[in-house]
Every structure is written in C-alpha cells, then in structure tokens.
Image (cartoon, grey):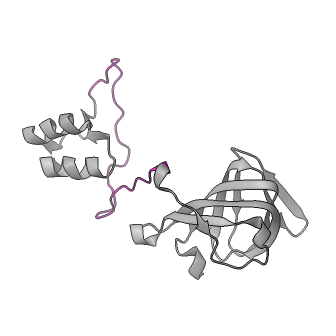
Amino acid sequence: MREFFSAADIRRLAGEGCQYLLLSPDDRITPEALDVARELGVQIHREGDADTVGRPLPKLLNKEARPGKPLKLVRADSVRLEPFAFDVGHPEMNIHVTDIITAEHGSPMAAGFMTWEKGSFPWTLNYDEIDFVIDGQLEIRMGNQVVIGNPGDVIFIPKGSNIFFGSPSYAKVFYVTYPADWDAQ
C-alpha cells in the first residue's frame, strides 16, 4: 500500500522521537517534507537504496502497522518511580514502581520499572510477566523452585503463578506484562 508523507507528517514523527524513516519503493514524500526532515534531523531512506557505506538498506518484512497506533518513545530522564500502591507488609523493602507503557497507549501489553531493597513478598500473577534484571539480584520463588536473576538475565513468570518476589540485597527490573491492565486482573 502506497503511503504519502507531508511536512506535517515529518513534524509529527520528529515530535514523537522518530529519527529515521524508511520509505517503501512506492511511498511518496513532498519536497517540503524532505526540507523539514533535514531541519529536524530525521533521516529518510528508501528501501533498496544504499546506506552511507554502500550497503543496501533492508527490505521491510512486514510494513503494515496497526492503524492509529503510533510509536511511543519514553525518555530515560522522564521515568519517575513511585511507591508501590499495594501493601505487601514489608515497608522496609522500599518498593517503587512505574508503568511506562499501558493500555492507555493502545498496547495490549504493559511495561515498566520496579525497584526494591532486601527482602521478599508474596504475589499471585493473574497475568504473564517477563522481568529483565537491570541491577542487583532478582529472586523468584515458586514452591520448591528458586530462580536468581543477575543483571542482563530474563525471567518469565506464567499467569497463575503464586510466587515470592525478592532480593538478597537490591533489585531493579524492567518488566513486561500481558495483558496491559495487570493490576486489574
């Protein structure tokens, strides 16, 4: 499907943090849009063109985006963790969390950051969750199974799990949940 890009489209994309636009061979872009892209630092390339070192740019495998669902960029310096809204009975753990992607963004998944200090608390997941350990150690206990994740490790926790979230020292994780409204499940 051929797409048409105007200067307004480029301004909108740049405002959303887009720095690179890859056009299909059939897409059209106005001369004014090209000027605006240069002014705003948005690089525009067309599939099949060579990049600056002579390599051909890749073909898009699936160019169809869901209509009405723009990209969402969350800048690191905008992330503010708030005290965990659920009382887990361990105030000494100093638990903080923030959802950065939610259903309000049109996503079926949610994502966010969570931190806590030494200790553990019980939790039942009525949703699927993937945790990426950024810092410290994340300890997940489920029955007799104990998994300890270190920085760079990823842990999947399936829906319906009764677990203990914990850390022997400190944990900072990036999480993804499905569905997005994990706290309403």
Quadrant of res 126? bottom right
Query: Where does residue 86 sit, x and y in percent of width and height?
Result: 67, 78
Quadrant of the frame with the C terminus: bottom right
Quadrant of res 20? top left
Quadrant of res 124? bottom right
* In the displayed structure image, the side of residue 183 where residue 66 appears, left or right: left
102 or 79: nearer the viewer: 79
Query: Where does residue 66 sit, x and y in percent of width and height?
Result: 33, 61
- Bounds of the magenta span? 49-76
Residue 163 shows in this picture: no
Q: Is residue 4 magenta?
A: no
Q: Is residue 16 above or below residue 31?
A: below
Q: Is residue 88 above or below residue 107?
A: below
Query: Where does residue 32 sit, x and y in percent of width and height?
Result: 8, 40
Residue at left 80%, top 63%?
166
Q: Is residue 10 above or below residue 145?
A: above
Residue at left 68%, top 44%?
152
Residue ranking furthest to the right = 144
Residue ranking furthest to the bottom = 184
Magenta region, main secondary structure: loop
26 or 128: nearer the viewer: 128
38 or 83: nearer the viewer: 83
Residue at left 26%, top 36%?
41
